[in-house]
Structures are given as C-alpha cells and as structure tokens.
Amino acid sequence: MSERNILRDAVYGAVIGDALGVPYEFEKRGSFVCTRMRGYGTHNQKPGTWSDDSSMLLATCRSLKDNNGRVDTEDMKQRFRDWLLDAKYTAGGSVFDAGITTTDAILRGKGSSEERSQGNGSLMRILPLAFTDCSDDEIREVSALTHAHPNCMEACVIYVHLARACIMGKDLRTCVHQLELTAPFHRLAGIDALGEDEIQSSGYVVHTLEAALWCVLNTDSFAECLMKAVNLGDDTDTTACVAGGLAGILYPIEDLPQDWYEKIRNKELIDACLV
C-alpha cells in the first residue's frame, strides 16, 4: 500500500459522508439531489456538522488509541456515555439525532438483542476495529454495547472483514462476490448487480450494509460514492457514513472536493482521535 494515512482517510471519509447526509435525513428518495456540502435541512445544523454516527466512531477510535489498539469495552462504554451525557466527541458541542436504541443501551449499560433492535447504530461506528487485529468475538462485543442482536453483530463482522481486505489492497468486488452468507445477508454477494430500485436505505442494519456496499461498488470516485449514498434518501447520514469509510480506504482524501473537507467542523477533535 502507499504511504498515505489510510486510517485518516477512512475516518474522514466516514465523517464527511455523515455530514453530507445530515441535512437530508428522512427525506424521500427522488425528492432532493445532493451535490454539495450544505447545512441546515432536517436537523438545522451548520454545514459540515456530523452526527452521532461520527461521534461514536471517534469515541471508538480514541478508545483504541488510548489503549494501544486493544479493545476495552468498558472504556468504550464510558466514552459513549461521555458523548451522550456531556456532548464530548461532537462537532459543535451538542448532541442531536441520538437513536432511541443506542440511547437506551448506553443508559442501561448494555445493548438489546430483541427483534426490534436491529438498527444500524453499531455498524456506523465499527470501522476503527478494521485497523486492529481484534477477533470476531471482540467485534461482536463492541457491537453489543448498543446493538446485541445477532444480525447487528454479524453485519459488523462482515463490514470489518471487508474493510480489512481493502486495507490490504484486495479487490473489494471480488471479496464481496466470494461471501458465503445466509439470510438476511444472502443478497450481499451479488449486491453490485442490483438496480437502485432494489436497494433500501432505511435504518435497518441489513439495508444499511447492502446500500453502502452497493454505492461503493457502483461508483468510481470518493465524491460519486458519497453523493449516491445520500441520494438514496431516508437514513442518508448513516448510509453515507458506512459507505464513506470504505471509500476512504479505496480513495485518498485529496480526491474529494476541497470545500467538503474544509467545511467539516471540529477537525481538531477528529485528528486527536486518530491513532
């Protein structure tokens, strides 16, 4: 691999995707077109503001940094509380768009494994684990801090494995095609061949993983990938965050429109969380 800082590009890819999608969250596909980094919209935030997705990803990243790459779930749990209750790891000093399942889990001290708890709240923050040698069981434990349903944990394992393959320079399309999975992940191996009308972009973890991979595999640049993810509508920030993390591994951050990067808020905090 090149000497570029792939972790930095991956994290910024996720954060920029998140911020790009924040103004459009919950909007219906086809009712808008995202072509630039704008603000306000759904959450009335300034341009370049990232949400809970990036806050929890950065908290995870900082925990790994301070523990020399070792997974310490108790430390992560406390950092998530610091975010939720004290607005640490935020773009502008305030918490917004915190998911109900995630909030309940942080306050309770553990994630739920109930059928209704199959959201994307652990997938959106799991990327930093791809840059460690942690085991699949540790990936599942980190997911379970907020989302303990087997489908959430499995989605995180699949995503980390694919991210690691990209870090090692393997071809993502080949790796995805070689996946041998059962329902509800059975569509992933052929996800790139599906049409946009077959891709859903809700907050359901399987939809998010499918949509993110579809965007990465059906685009040829960082910017095109992130815009495609946002323009799917609905859970725009998380789809673009998850897709952006992989795109950041595949493409150097310099490939992005410069003003997208420049508008990102609180880059000092982001840089401080990188290993």
Image: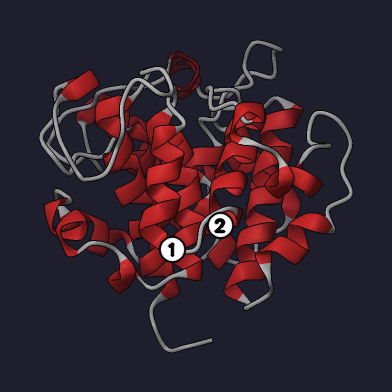
In this view of the protein, can residue 58 be seen by the observer? no
Which residue sits at x=67%, y=59%? Answer: 162
Q: Is residue 171 visible?
A: yes
Position above or below: 224 against 154: below
- Toward the viewer: 174 or 132? 174
Q: Give the amino acid type for the residue marked by disc 2 in the picture.
A: Leu
Q: Quadrant of residue 255?
A: bottom left
- List the residue tagged with mark 1: 221
The quadrant of the picture occupied by the C terminus is bottom left
Relative placement, left or right, of 247 versus 62 is right
Q: Secondary structure at mark 2?
A: helix
Q: Secondary structure at mark 1?
A: loop
What's the residue at 42%, 89% (across, down)?
A: 3
Q: On the image, which quarter does residue 184 sit in?
A: top right
Compare marks 1 and 2 and give the one earlier in the sequence: 2
Q: Nearer the viewer, residue 57 or 109?
A: 57
For disc 2, the marked residue is 129
On the image, which quarter does residue 223 sit in? Answer: bottom left
Q: Tell me the mark number nearer the camera, choosing from 1 and 2.
A: 1
Q: Amino acid at mark 1?
A: Ser
Residue 174 pos. (x, y %): 76, 65
How many numbered markers are drawn?
2
